[in-house]
Image (cartoon, coloured by chain):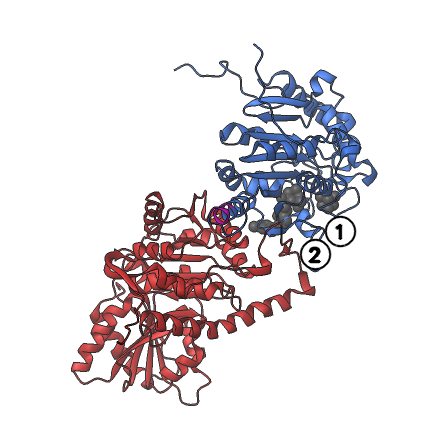
Amino acid sequence: MATVLEQPQIWAKELLLNGCQAVAQGVKLADVDVIAAYPIRPYTEVMDALSKIIADGELDSEYIVADSEHSQFEIVKHASSVGARAFAGSSGTGWMYGFEALVVTATDRLSPLFLVGNRALDDPGAFGVEHNDALAVRDMGWLLCWASTAQEALEHVLIGYRIAEDNRVRMPMALAMDGAFLTHSQHMVKLPTQEAVQRFLPPYDLGNRRMHPDNPVSIAPQVNEDWVMELRRQNWEAARRAKDVVAQAYKEYNEIFGNRYVSPYFDEFMTEDAEVVLIGLGAVAMPARTAVRRLRNQGKKVGYVNLRWFRPFPTEELRAALGRMKAVGVIDRDFAHGSPDSGGIVVHDIRSCLYPLTTRPAIANFIGGLGGRDISIEDCIRMFEVTAQAPNRAPGDELVTWIGLRE
Amino acid sequence: MATQLPVVDYEKIKNVHATPLEEFYTSGHRTCQGCESAMVMRDFAKATGPRTVVTGATGCMYVANTSYLTTPWIVPWMHTQLGAGGASAVGMAAGLRALMRKGRIPKEKINVINFSGDLGAADMGVGGISGALQSDYDLLIIMYDNESAANTDIQATGSTTYGAQTTFTPPGSKHRIMQRRWKKNIAPMLAVGHPTCRYVATASATFPALDFMNKVRKALAIGGPTFIHTFDPCPKGWDFHPKYSRELGELGIKSGIFPLYEIIDGHVVYTYDAQKKGRIPVREYLEKQGRFAHLIDEDVEHIQRMVDSMWQEWEVPGVAPFKAGLSVAAT
Ligand SMILES: Cc1ncc(C[n+]2csc(CCOP(=O)(O)OP(=O)(O)O)c2C)c(N)n1
Ligand code: SF4
Ligand SMILES: [Mg+2]
């Protein structure tokens, strides 16, 4: 008689959750030890959800209502330093208020995970999405990735801790999510079982760097010119090693949870034979994909690349994916005033990534959706049209087009 | 009406010979000769012993203490940001508590200590310390007060004595006195505002002998979030010969300009009652420091009057100026 091997159960249930609630479920599954909360829209709902989860006894975690974002981030940094898995988050101006703490969390090589519910920076006050907040940590030794569905958001709490805590990496992780469009829109979300999560995510182990009387270390003494370059170099090496760790984490994630991610770094939509593609971060993927389908119906060879990871930046992967295109349009839901060609932030990284290629696509740049303004399907069609013209652009022509601007 | 003082059961160091010999803050630092703040470090670590974790905010006790590849700390120590003293203690205490509860590290009492300077604690970090003192974690925050931003070359802070010369408050031909703020009364301010905080004290590392170490032990024995403010003569910032550091601390306390007390569960206990013992003139303390060399008699008299009023007019002498009943406006 043949024995049937019992397949371990992978998915526990499916629930209707918004992005913030999905992240809260991820934090619960990651069995986080210390959470520090401070209110600011739109990320706050993750903390509302977590406080209830803890109140109901579903998660055993310290929950601290901090007096400011600076304290909030310092609390999780120091909780992480004693070996606790820690979670915090913020949005917009709150993220910037704690910025000093964000910088040292990376240089101290600690691994808390933060949700950034992307929000425009003050002034003037605006609740809607802009990516300048999360992008501010891009040069500071952070892992930085965007979820574009609630399901992805939950899964990237688990994948995020796994990569951040790996002793080859040891960097903090910012999981970004478009304010309102994802933080507060509901999706059906599959929740993995605790057993499956445990197979994927080992406990946080700081080893000989943890603060404990049995391990009397001195952490972050003053260095000056004697050593600071060597220490920066170690951060640089960790950021480079992160690429291998990312690859391994997704491979194992796919093995346990079914092939959910073709590439860790970005999703390609109808790009196989495409000549003109748009690339962007976050929720703009939805109208962009619809635009692709419409244009494909008209026989246009277009596609969309949904960029998930910004740090580490997928240099080789993007060269392989975009190098053969005729034109690439980069959508920036952010701005970099006074930068080369006055483009957004993302375009500069993509342009410099493609620059060494002998044949490279023409680049167009779009700034749109600022402060939460909708980027419509028609806006995306227009961006495809402008991008298709990019190879004919004369030197000196504008690189940047503002989309959906009232003029 | 006599009030019953709460009894604190703690391991008191009874005399100088009974002081623990073992050092947990030792050689490997480069603080100035005669640095009283360094004595605060040494003494608190001696008092807490080895089952301790420490964070130190940016300031002299970071920069002059810990240079990469050398460290005076035998106990685990970590830098924290200038205004992050309170949050750093909360973070460590929360992490340790969660890990113990979940069985990931052995259950035991680990002393969680943060030290921050006067600028770090009483100015920039006061919000975070207030948050920490509202928490239910066992932690002790020590504000070592050298009355300036010493590390950045002696700038005035909210805790600098009235009239003192600093690099932000130099005497000039038009304005003799640029430091016109009265010292912030941080310890009572924290004690009054945080019912969760059962122990607040002021102290000096060296006067009276053992007083500070025993206050550290008391704070840890009482538990919960606690706060100690130390008074640290700084030869470089106050401009005096390093051999007078201990003596200046004593003069400051005896003149009453820095009152010594504990506030235990809301009860004020004077640990050196300058008023009862007879305050010495504040001039004796001021005149030994270069930072007051530009003051004229009138200024010294002003400071003396302010100190007199602290002890003679304040509702809680030397501690709190509230006038019960007198200043409540009629509505
Ligand atoms: C956020 C921030 N602002 C300014 C500084 C520069 N800084 C370093 S130490 C210091 C003085 C701190 O004064 P205090 O807390 O009294 O400690 P002390 O140096 O007197 O020991 C300052 C202003 C800093 N490190 N961080
Ligand atoms: S400047 Fe003052 S506080 Fe700083 S090390 Fe010297 S004596 Fe100590
Ligand atoms: Mg100071």
- Magenta segment, prevailing SS (helix, strand or loop): helix
Q: Which residue is mark 1?
A: B30
Q: Which residues are magenta?
A: B97-101
Dot 1 and dot 2 residues touching (CB under 8 Å)? yes
Q: Position of residue A168 (x, y in %)?
A: 53, 69
Judged from the image, the secondary structure of the residue bearing numbered disc 1 is: loop
Q: Residues within 10 Å of mark 1 (few under 14, many from 20)?
A: some
Name the amino acid type tagged 2: Ser
Name the amino acid type tagged 1: Arg
B202 vs A211, nearest the viewer: A211
- Classify A172 as above or below A277: above
Q: Is residue A92 left or right of residue B52?
A: left
Whether residue B110 is visible to the viewer of this picture, yes or no, is yes
Q: Residue at x 48, y 37 (%)?
A: B136
Quarter assignment of residue B304: top right
Query: In the rendering, what colour is chain A?
Result: red
Q: Position of residue A226 (x, y in %)?
A: 70, 64
Q: Is residue B98 magenta?
A: yes
The chain holding disc 1 is B
Q: Is residue A212 magenta?
A: no
